[in-house]
Image (cartoon, grey):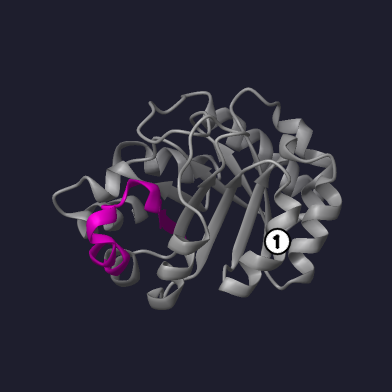
Amino acid sequence: MIQIAPSMLAADFLHLDKDVEIVNENADLFHLDIMDGVFVPNISYGFPVVEAIATVARKPMDAHLMIVHPEKYIERFARIGVSMLSFHLNATDKPAQTLLHIRETGMKAGLVINPDMPVDSLYPYLHLCDYIILMSVYAGFGGQKFIDDTYGRIRTLKAEIDRQGLPVQIEVDGGVCPANAKALVDAGAEILVAGSAVFKAEDPAAVIASMRG
């Protein structure tokens, strides 16, 4: 089943409760983009916002760390109630240990790569992952144009996951919308992150439904 994970970075922060309910009622996951202004040039939001969402979230929280030293914050995200925690492969020199630590807390562990990192850089770590996020834009800013090479990257990664016989899901993040959702799923994606396409729409529920196919 295809899962839709609206990115809360695109939500209306003056009326966050309204957009949280859109996810609760229509989507599958809360996608939380955590940026530190160091690993990526932008700063998003931190623990206070995640904790606030956690108090009313009825769907699992999927936190995507775009920060240096992600290993420092694993326990805290677990305590808040995050279900899925991912970090960028090049954000730490201890990716294997970090993935194991995430799993030890009971969260699902994910690795993320930007469009300029080769897909095969993930292969040594797939057996430690529950999911992989392939960025279809460059991490750090919302509203970027989708990069078409993503389809081939998904197919390549899916083939390797199948070759290794692993139950690893592929999540795609960046520029995802109803126009490309079916092609992404056909290529092998199972989780679609969509920010602006959902929260800037006149009818977010209809957009989410259309991306499910």
- Residue 173 pos. (x, y %): 48, 42
Residue labelled with disc 1: 74
Q: Would residue 96 be visible to someone looking at this image?
A: yes
In magenta segment, residue 16:
yes
In the displayed orientation, state which residue is furthest to the left.
202
What is the x, y in percent for residue 205? 23, 60
- Whether 15 is drawn above or below 164: the answer is below
Residue 73, image x and y in percent?
Answer: 69, 58
Q: Residues within 10 Å of mark 1 (few under 14, many from 20)?
A: many
Residue sitting nearer the eye, 58 or 93: 93
Q: Amino acid at mark 1?
A: Ile
Q: Position of residue 133 (x, y in %)?
A: 59, 45
Is 23 colored magenta in this rendering? no
Q: Is residue 161 above or below residue 27?
A: above
Callout 1: helix, strand or loop?
helix
Q: Residue at x 49, y 70 (%)?
A: 60
Q: Is residue 80 left or right of residue 185?
A: right
Residue at 29% from the left image edge and 54% from the top image edge: 13
Q: Which of 126 and 31 lies nearest the eye of the viewer?
A: 31
Question: In this picture, which residue range is highlighted in magenta?
Answer: 1-21
Identity of the residue drawn at 48% across and 54% down: 32
In the visual, does 191 lie left or right of 157?
Answer: left
